[in-house]
Amino acid sequence: MAKFNSQITTLFIVVALVCAFVPAFSVEEAEANLLWNTCLVKITPKCALDIIAAVFENGTMPDPCCNDLVKEGKVCHDTLIKYIADKPMLIAHETEYLKKSDDLWKHCVLISKSA
């Protein structure tokens, strides 16, 4: 039961992050919301947080999450990171975040091929 509760808590954290970074009332964001909903179901909430930490902080990416990231797909990964990086409080470092995102993708592809 405790594991289920921690998974629910983690899911709520991811949803809160999505809501903070993707405005729900913007018409131009409707496609992004659909993509968020489609892409987020392909990875665990913990891995979603690990991906965000690896790109926007100095977090590390566990190998099992690399496999989830590759299964999620490059289009989902790139689009989600780009939407977050485009937000006003992050835009000044967007180039850095996009490079970290690319580096993370390449690293994870290598990890998933060796598994």
Image (tube, rainbow, N blue to C red):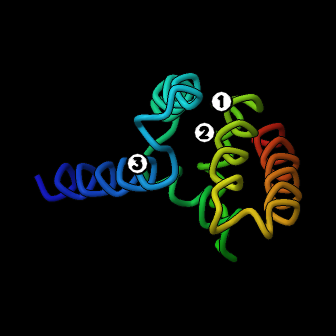
Instruction: Tell me where residue 55 appears, x and y as whole percent.
Output: 71, 62
- Residue 15, above or below 77: below
Q: Which residue is mark 3?
A: 19
Q: Which residue is mark 1?
A: 71
* Above/below status of 2 relative to 68: below
Q: How packed is label 1: few (under 14 Cα within 10 Å), some, or many (20 or more)?
A: some
Instruction: State if disc 2 and disc 1 touch (CB < 8 Å).
Output: yes
Disc 1 residue type?
A: Lys
- Identify the residue at the far left of this view: 1
Instruction: Determine the residue positioned at 63% across, 31% down.
Output: 72
Q: Which residue is mark 2?
A: 68
Q: Name the residue located 75 percent from the left edge and 39 percent from the top edge.
A: 78
Image point (70%, 39%), residue name: 77
Mark 3 or 1: the one toward you: 3
Q: Observer-nearest residue: 52 or 61?
A: 52
Tell me residue 108's x, y (percent).
Answer: 78, 48
